[in-house]
Amino acid sequence: MAYTTSEIRNLALIGHVAAGKTLLAEALLHRSGAIRGMGELTRGTTVCDSDPLAKELQHSTDSAVCHLEWQGKRVNLIDTPGYPDLLGRSQAALAAVETAAIVVDGTSGIGIATRRMNEAAVQRGLDRILIITKIDQPGINLSELLAQLQQAFGSECLPINLPAEGGKRVIDCFFSREGPTTDFSSVEQAHRAIVEQVIEIDTELLERYLGGDESISAEQLHDPFERALREGHLIPVCFTSATSGAGINELLDLIARLLPSPLEANPPSFVKGEGEAIEPVTVEPDAARHALAHVFKVTIDTYQGRVSILRVHQGTLRTGMQLFVGDQRKPFRISHLFQLQGPALQEVSNAVPGDLCALTKIDELHIDAVVHDSRDEDHHHLKPPEAMAAMQGIAIGAARHGDEQKIADALHKLLSEDPSLRLEHIPSLNETVLYGRGELHLRVARKRSSAATRWRIPMPTAAPGSPHWHFSV
């Protein structure tokens, strides 16, 4: 499918661990025809959880990019991890999208990561939608959960569809004014609530409505609906079940018809300059302007080498063109350009503003790097999110002489892939300490390096409960 920037929709699936983000992505891919059959989490056959560690834990440990087509729109999805220890990886993905799709487990409700990622999305100025999963589970109280969401995130959280027949199906409440009986509330009530919320920011429509004109169409509501999303005045709530497929079509329709393209969302927070001279700068999603893109993820693969995943913000990337990294003087050449479907790289010839794409074997690229084809953008940066403090550390040392280089290579790989890790040498202890968000974060780091370094299980070097642990090659 050939597409333009206006036809792109970018979403990050964020939320607490086990909310159902990966299975939801799989259901969307399957329903759209992007994949033939749905994979299973327990078998490690989903598109997004292809990493061996994710298969072992049966939960995402890193973000994954995939794409689909629906109603003539190109939809890019980023599935993110929900473990609180791994939210640094999830936050990095927010820089690549216009919409944060906050996924909430219908059976267990709001988790710690749900709140933290919602705050991160607000800081980025992203549009937000809430997706409630597992709506067909017995004994579930979705009306109570909606009330909890409104208490946690505001009264602007309004259902854009409603479950019916015990969660077996979902009924649209935005394009329809009335409909069949739903499991709670009603189509009429939900439609009226959304209309009244949206027209609050449009003086002309508000005057018509207050004057008794309730014939305002969905098409007339489209522009103020998008503005309400941009301003956080509306957070649509939709209901789904990835296992039964309930609500999947309705969610795809919502993405294609109502969510913003890169031309319609709040602009990314780019700045220009260094130190006190820093100032905001506008980057326009215009395919004809200077090319500018931002690296939001890096992986180092045994076979593909360094894979850098970028969001194109301005201009067009093409095979054969030369790009600069920040203010580096020497450019690099794009030999191959790829789109992503989970771990699979599919070669393409160009990438337009809004595209998510990948470059391989470019050692100069790192997370948060800005690449461009003009010296005018030498000092452009994307405003970083608030840093997540490291909470726990592992002291690392070599058991055998000559293994130091193996450890150095492993640490370089870890820090390249995960900027929320931090390395520090403590002279008084003559130890190098790797800091992370918590025990799971450090355990994942060790697991990711075990194939290359053959580290043994950590052995404690201090009293139980000490934040410092030692493991060796």
Image (tube, helix red, strand yellow):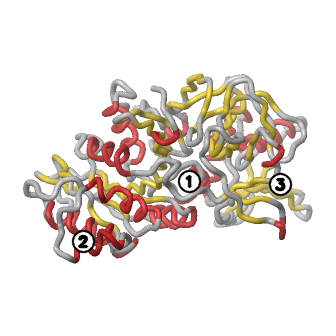
Dot 2 or dot 1: first in sequence order is 1
Calculate the distance from the C-alpha at mark 3 to the C-alpha at mark 1.
Answer: 31 Å
Q: Residue at x 23, y 40 (%)?
A: 244
Are the residues tagged 3 and 2 within 8 Å (C-beta)?
A: no
Write down the residue under mark 1. 94
Residue 121, percent from left and from top: 52, 61
Camera-side residue of 247 and 293:
293
Are the residues tagged 2 and 1 within 8 Å (C-beta)?
A: no
Residue 454, percent from left and from top: 71, 35
Write down the residue under mark 3. 432
Q: Residue at x 68, y 43 (%)?
A: 293
What amino acid is found at the position of numbered circle 3 in the picture?
A: Thr
On the rendered structure, is 311 left or right of 369? Answer: left
Count neighbours of disc 3 (C-alpha within 10 A) and say few if under 14, some if 14 to 19, many if 20 or more: some
Please, which residue is most extreme toward the left here? 181
Dot 3 or dot 2: first in sequence order is 2
Q: Is residue 39 above or below residue 247?
A: above
What amino acid is found at the position of numbered circle 1 in the picture?
A: Leu
Dot 3 or dot 1: first in sequence order is 1
What amino acid is found at the position of numbered circle 2 in the picture?
A: Arg
Write down the residue under mark 2. 208
Are the residues tagged 3 and 1 within 8 Å (C-beta)?
A: no
